[in-house]
Image (cartoon, rainbow, N blue to C red):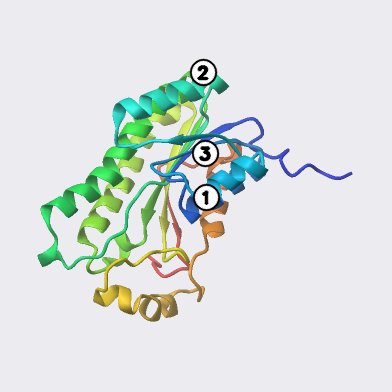
Amino acid sequence: MQINKYERGLKDKVALVTGAATRNGQAICERLAEEGAIVIVADIVTSSYELELMKDSNIITRHFVVDVTDIAAVDLMIQEIVSAFGRIDILVHNIGIYEEEPFELLTFQQWNQMLHITLNSLFICTQAVLPIMKKNSFGRIITMSSDTVWLGTPYLTHYVTAKMGVIGFTRSLAGEVGRYGVTINTITMGLTATQRQDKQTPLSSSLLEHIIPNQAVIRSDEPEDIANVVAFLALPASGIISGQTINVDGGVARH
């Protein structure tokens, strides 16, 4: 008997994926859909990829162009999702920006923007979905950090600080929400195949040369590597796992 690939462990679960216009976000949406989830995507932009999916497949059920650092905009989005589907079971918070800058050249504006986008968006989105998850006695929140927090990667002081904040947020909140059937875990990603280096700092000019040879698995992370771990953490069967940091970086941060 042929098994429908959409009849899997997340059948009829409603998953909200923020930062979905990135390649990591796209892979996460596809992987959750393969497990049967109803996938809602949100990003500050609409990618051509998302438009193609909405036209040619059932992967994306609803799309929101939203600034997830805007409380009112996020609240409105959540209201519309609940009105349409009655629930939100999974939040994959895939928001973040990457920027290299030597610390002495780092401006307060750059510092503040990094913390604002990374941490304020996490606070706003999580606080918006949590009452719905608690009411339904089920929730999976998956956040994104970086293995740079273990490596102390230079030229990324503001980025590393923000990503370490994601881990602290995740660990603390897990202790509050577990009794309601809600788990929260974070993924520390390594150098993904889609990582962008926008500025020519010493790190970006030799990133592949210096990092990948030190990994246990000698290749860069692919978006699908991240998506597979997200799907696992989203499953009902992963309900005993919470407050954890899962390293997905090819074994470069072996600690």
Residue plotted at (28% across, 74% down):
203
Quarter of the picture containing the C terminus is bottom left
Q: Amino acid at mark 2?
A: Ser
The residue labelled by disc 3 is 240
Tell me the distance, in whole angstroms, between the alpha carbons under discs 2 and 3: 30 Å
Secondary element at tag 3:
loop
Tell me the distance, in whole angstroms, between the alpha carbons under discs 1 and 3: 38 Å
Question: Mark 1 or mark 2: which comes first in sequence?
Answer: 1
Residue 29 visible at all? no
The spot of residue 79 in percent (x, y) is 44, 21
Secondary element at tag 1:
helix
Residue plotted at (14% across, 51% down):
109
* Residue 29, quarter of the rendered image: top right
Q: Are marks 1 and 2 in contact (CB under 8 Å)?
A: no
Quarter of the picture containing the N terminus is top right
Tag count: 3
The spot of residue 100 in percent (x, y) is 25, 65
Asked whether, in this view, residue 6 is left or right of residue 114, the answer is right
Question: Mark 2 or mark 3: which comes first in sequence?
Answer: 2
Q: Are marks 2 and 3 in contact (CB under 8 Å)?
A: no
Q: Amino acid at mark 1?
A: Ser
The residue labelled by disc 2 is 83
Tell me the distance, in whole angstroms, between the alpha carbons under discs 1 and 2: 27 Å
State whether residue 129 is above or below residue 242.
above
Residue 194 visible at all? yes
Residue plotted at (14% across, 65% down):
103
The residue labelled by disc 1 is 48
